[in-house]
Amino acid sequence: MGLFMGALGGEMNNQIYALHPSGKEPPQAPILEQMRVSYRAVGRRALGMGASFATITAVFSGIECVVEKYRGKHDLINGAVSGCAAGAALSAKSGPATACMGCVGFAAFSVAIEAVMGPH
């Protein structure tokens, strides 16, 4: 699921970066060359986003299963702990302050989704 979401996001996000970095209209290449370059750019972006979504999915699901097994319950705390771990893992490269913000943001999002969706 994470790889699919990354591919979809990469394709949609590629349209945002369609302009040349200089802001000027690039010279027109033949249409087949434009398509080849565009599809390669979509593929690279989709691969990167797919890897990020796969990491989030693996960390979140793995931690949630471990916490649920350890605690013996299924409640909001499991989602908060696993959301915190996934957010911190995703933003760990940017430093400890960013990792803390990622932890808090993902934990809050996870608790909100669990509260809205209810027990599964």
Image (cartoon, rainbow, N blue to C red):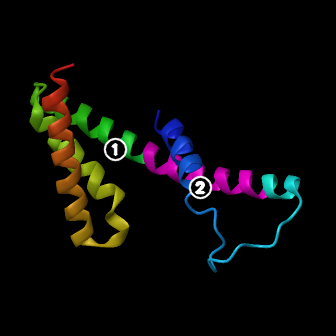
Q: Residue at x 26, y 64 (%)?
A: 99
Instruction: Check residue 51 for magenta coloring.
Output: yes
Q: From which residue to which does the magenta span run?
A: 37-54
* Residue 53 placement, left or right of 35: left
Comes first in the chain, label 2 or label 1? 2
Q: Secondary structure at mark 2?
A: helix
| Position of 68 relative to 14 (above/below) | above
Query: Residue tagged by mark 1?
Result: 59
* Residue 36 placement, left or right of 53: right
Do the CB atoms of the residues marked 2 and 1 lie less than 8 Å apart? no
Query: Percent x, y for residue 110?
Result: 21, 40
Query: Residue tagged by mark 2?
Result: 14
Query: Percent x, y for residue 96?
Result: 24, 71
Query: Percent x, y for residue 17?
Result: 58, 63
- Toward the bottom, the furthest residue is 22
Q: Residue at x 73, y 50 (%)?
A: 39
| In-front residue for pair 42/69 | 42
* Residue 111 placement, left or right of 2: left
